[in-house]
Image (cartoon, rainbow, N blue to C red):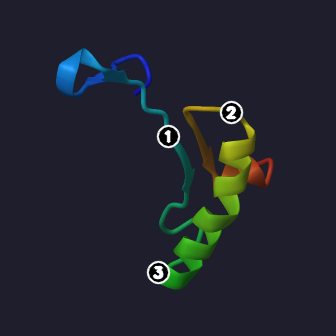
Amino acid sequence: MAANPVMIERGVALRLTISAGVAALPEDGSWLERLSVAADRSLPAAKGGGRNRVMTRAELAGGV
């Protein structure tokens, strides 16, 4: 995402980055609440790992 700046008015370019915590069915739970908790636990690790990072619950647990 950061590699493709978003051009806004008057030629100003914004470089956007994203960090995300990801959970998957059925490995991380079968209920929305459990998936949400698993993703929420992964997000701080993604943010701490630097810009443009996605962290799965499995990576957080050392399974990947």
Residue lying farthest to the right in this orientation = 62
Quadrant of the rendered structure where residue 50 is?
top right
Q: Where is residue 21 in the image (x, y as percent from the top left)?
A: 58, 54
- Tell which circle, 3 or 2, labels the residue nearer the N-terminal end: 3
**Front residue of this view, candidates 42 and 27:** 42
Q: Name the residue under label 2.
A: 50
**Front residue of this view, candidates 40 and 34:** 40
- Residue 12 makes an appearance in the image: yes
Q: Name the residue under label 1.
A: 18
Q: Name the residue under label 3.
A: 32
- Position of 61 compared to 34: left or right? right
Screen quadrant of the C terminus: top right
Amino acid beneath label 2: Gly
Indicate whether 48 appears above or below 2. Answer: below
Amino acid beneath label 3: Leu
Q: Where is residue 37 in the image (x, y as percent from the top left)?
A: 62, 74
Circle 1 crowding by C-alpha within 10 Å: few under 14, some 14–19, many from 20: few
Circle 3 crowding by C-alpha within 10 Å: few under 14, some 14–19, many from 20: few
Circle 2 crowding by C-alpha within 10 Å: few under 14, some 14–19, many from 20: few
Q: Is mark 3 on a helix, strand or loop?
A: helix
Instruction: Please give the name of the residue rendered at 62% of the width and 66% of the height, measured from the top-left corner.
Output: 40
